[in-house]
Image (cartoon, rainbow, N blue to C red):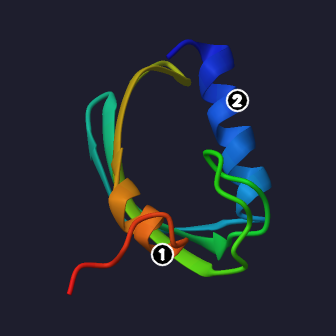
Amino acid sequence: MNKDQVRGLYQGIFSAFGTPKLEFHEVLWDGDMAAIRFTMTGRHVDEFMGLPASGTAIALPGITISHFRGDRVIERFSQADMLGLLVQVGAVPASA
């Protein structure tokens, strides 16, 4: 994703989940790289990926690894539990 696409992704998330909160559980540094394990919480208040607002409180765990050059991020890798999020907002049925 380029810079504009990343900006659009985050604008969509902030619109869909109100004012989400980020809790950082661990922040690990190694030279010019950082790994952050986080949980984003919020409420599904607007359309997300074509799904109408459900009003459901959500918790989305994930991890991001960033590579810095000076004060700029030059590479970023993120993984979040999107399937879990889709279950929480009712787009995917929960397994029994």
Q: CA distance from mark 1 to mark 2?
A: 23 Å
Q: Which residue is mark 1?
A: 88
Above or below 70: residue 18: below
Measuring from the top left, give residue 90's x and y in whole percent. Answer: 51, 72
Q: Quadrant of residue 24?
A: bottom left
Question: Which residue is located at x 60 percent, y 26 percent?
Answer: 6
Question: Which residue is located at x 64 percent, y 56 percent?
Answer: 51
Q: Earlier in the sequence, mark 1 or mark 2?
A: 2
Residue lying farthest top? 2
Quick check: 75 left or right of 54? left
- Mark 2 residue element: helix
Q: Which residue is mark 2?
A: 8
Number of other residues with Cα within 10 Å of mark 2, as a class: few under 14, some 14 to 19, many 20 or more: few
Viewer-side label of 1, 2: 1
Q: Identify which amino acid the numbered label 1 is placed on.
A: Gln
Number of other residues with Cα within 10 Å of mark 1, as a class: few under 14, some 14 to 19, many 20 or more: some
